[in-house]
Amino acid sequence: MLRLFLMLSISFLLSGPMPSVFLMVGSTVSANAIIPPIQIAVNSVCRNPTSARTTTFAILSPCHPMCALRICRRPTYCRATYKHCGPAALTVSLLCCKGADSGRAWLALRYLIPAVIAVTILLLLMPLDISDDITPTVVRQGTGDVLTGHGNRAVAYVSHDPIVIESNSDFAAQGWPGSGTQDDPFRIAGINVTAFDECVVVKNTNVFFLIEDSYLECYGPNTAITFVNVTGGAVENCTVLSHFTAMSVVSSECSVTDSVIEGELFGISLKNSATCSIERCVLRHSGNSALSLTGCDNCALIGCNISDTSVGISLSESTGCSVTGNRLEDCELRLSGEIEDWHHDIRDNYVSDLPLGYFWGVSDDMVFGTEYGQIIMANCTRLTLFDGSFSGQSPVVVAYSSECVVSSMKAHGCDIGVRLLKSENCRVTGSVFSGDRYGIAVSESVGTLIRNCTIYEERNTAVGVDMSPGTVVDRCELYSNSFTAIEFSYSPHCQVRRSTVHGNGRSGVHFYYSEYGVVSMCNLTRNVDYGISLISANGSLITNSSVTENGFGIYLAGCERANVSHCDVSRNAREGVVIWSDRCMVTWNNITQNGSFGVLIAQHYGENQLYGNLFADNGPGNALDDGDNNLWDDGSGLGNIWSDFNGTVPYQVPGLAHAVDQFPSGIDSDGDGLLDWTESHVYGTDPHDPDTDNDGVDDGAEIAAGRDPTVPFDSPVAGRTLGPFVLCAMLAAVSLCILSSRSRAARRGGLP
């Protein structure tokens, strides 16, 4: 019967003029059949091919809802319809000219008849899977696009203007029929609303209504569906698209079932709503969250497929929700809020084909990370996560927990490798992080220890610590990260110790409003901006560390009572130590060979004290003091060692402050008793060679003897005289040499 119907239909088309016909047959093609679109254009018989109208024959089957066979709004997508549709669609387009005479029309048929016969033969040979229980699709009057909804029902949509409902009475006033649900309220079905503004807006209603089998697309920066203060709203078997948020629900009770949701910012956003349900939906292509709940209670998220989004499901400040049977591909379940907002019924969910591990209130146990795609530990005590290799968004989250351990895990390409939130005395040990946005993020936690971890090539900060006092980073290596390696914000009493921090795109270690921080026994090198930077970090200590080959060495801004001691601050491209602070101490450091000043004190900053330091070979000068009342000695006999000290006391420190070192020392690199500066600037000798002229006498001894230390075995320097004792000594030495020579000659000749 089907084949006969097709043949009769095509014969009908060929029996008269060429009307615009849209013929649909409600039968399904085998799912295994792949039939590309076939288009036959007879432009040769058209004087104006661009004015041709299109006649389309279609064998329809459940197909992707984006593809409208008559009017395709996404031609680049629908051009490969046979690739994206399950059971494929076959389309034949025939072009004929408007206003062409009958002779030319029949001339067109001469070209078209063979093609139509070929299509008919193809249809006769094509295997058809026809089931008795298939209901033919009904084409309503004024049919628009023919699309297929997520519920696998072929739907004929009717184009419709945007809909705004602001009260119960608006449903009846706009002519919407009943059978929405309870007590037969209202039903909106089979429509296509494609608009720049919102497609459907419903506000302030308490009657049940159903939006069903519809296509709703907002191509402007607006929301496709908006519910505000709505009770009993339902969306079923719809396709909802938006360049902003696909569906926004505020202060409402509603359900969304068997629908395709695509919002470029949010898929479905629920705020301050209760007892809502989202079931068996496909949510994808969202830049922020596919499914976001804020301030929502007792909602159900069941059996959804979520992909191509940053955050699959976000529950913020929401309680008592059920999250079951969902599949998240390369995205995460994210929880936030107070401790009660982390307690939900979360089970039977999968993240990237592995179970989502949700652990609430677990104590004294171990979890093996290899078994899970994402792990959430909330309200746990002494729970240990061991091993596991993760990729995705934030694979490991520890919240409101104490003494928990994350050990020997790997994370690559994640948003945050490990996230610790509002927890106490937790540890991250022996783990490797790379290619993430953040390696480890610690927030509002106390006493966190990060030990023996390697963190490299992160897209942002390797370790970010915010409002988390007492955090310690110990024995870690952090390198080649795009931004700062370790950053503390509003986190007092934090430490970085025995760690290597090198080659990072910003600073090695940064303290921001984090008092009493400590950097000790660390090696910080080749960081682009600063080796160590402290901003408003009062009372901090930098000690026993090597800070070399960075942009700047150490930067102190807005800090009071910071202390830099026993460090090697050398070969940095700019200043070794920059001080924009008051009352800081810089003591017992080697500050050498920096590209600019060894130490720079900015204007208006004072009462800093610097002593016991070695300043040598720094750019334009060893120091520059433009501040006020800074001290360059300890006041009781100990100053600094200066490579440019010429013996004049006090040593004048360059700068607007006109500061002095009252107890300066010079450098005698070769130990010949002459200061380096004096050797290079006065005597022309090598400050690194004690015997410049290689005559066996040190340069200092030659100067003391009145000889020229640059000329071997020279006579006294002009203008100097030899004392009688020196002259007698020289004559005695000559006499001894003569006697010794004669004695050796006598022994050789046998003389007595």
Image (cartoon, rainbow, N blue to C red):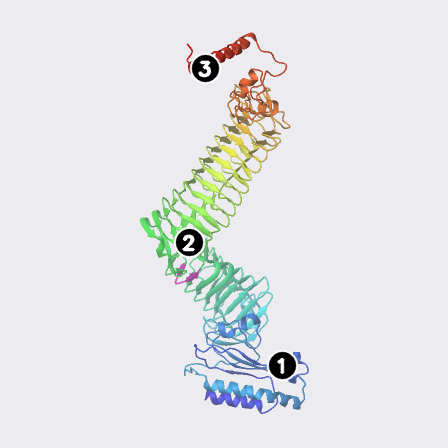
Q: Nearer the viewer, mark 2 or mark 3?
A: 3
Q: Is residue 328 magenta?
A: yes
**Residue 636: x, y in percent?**
52, 18
**Residue 496: x, y in percent?**
45, 38
**Residue 384: x, y in percent?**
34, 48
Q: How would you classify the magenta stretch by its main secondary structure?
A: strand
Q: Say which residue label 2 marks.
A: 395
Considering only order in the chain, which callout, 3 or 2, is on the residue closer to the N terminus? 2
Q: Say which residue label 3 marks.
A: 745
Query: Mark number for residue 53?
Result: 1
Judged from the image, the secondary structure of the residue bearing numbered disc 1 is: strand
Nearest the viewer among 594 and 720 is 720
| Amino acid type for the residue under numbered disc 3 | Ala
Judged from the image, the secondary structure of the residue bearing numbered disc 3 is: helix
Question: Crowding at label 2, few (<14), some or many (≥20) Cα neighbours within 10 Å?
Answer: many
Which span of residues is magenta-colored?
322-329
Q: Residue furthest top?
A: 724
Quadrant containing the C terminus is: top left
The alpha-carbon separation of the residues under discs 2 and 3 comes to 94 Å
| Amino acid type for the residue under numbered disc 2 | Pro
Question: Crowding at label 3, few (<14), some or many (≥20) Cα neighbours within 10 Å?
Answer: few
Q: Quadrant of residue 476?
A: top left
Q: Is residue 183 left or right of 657 when viewed as pictured?
A: left
The alpha-carbon separation of the residues under discs 3 and 1 comes to 130 Å
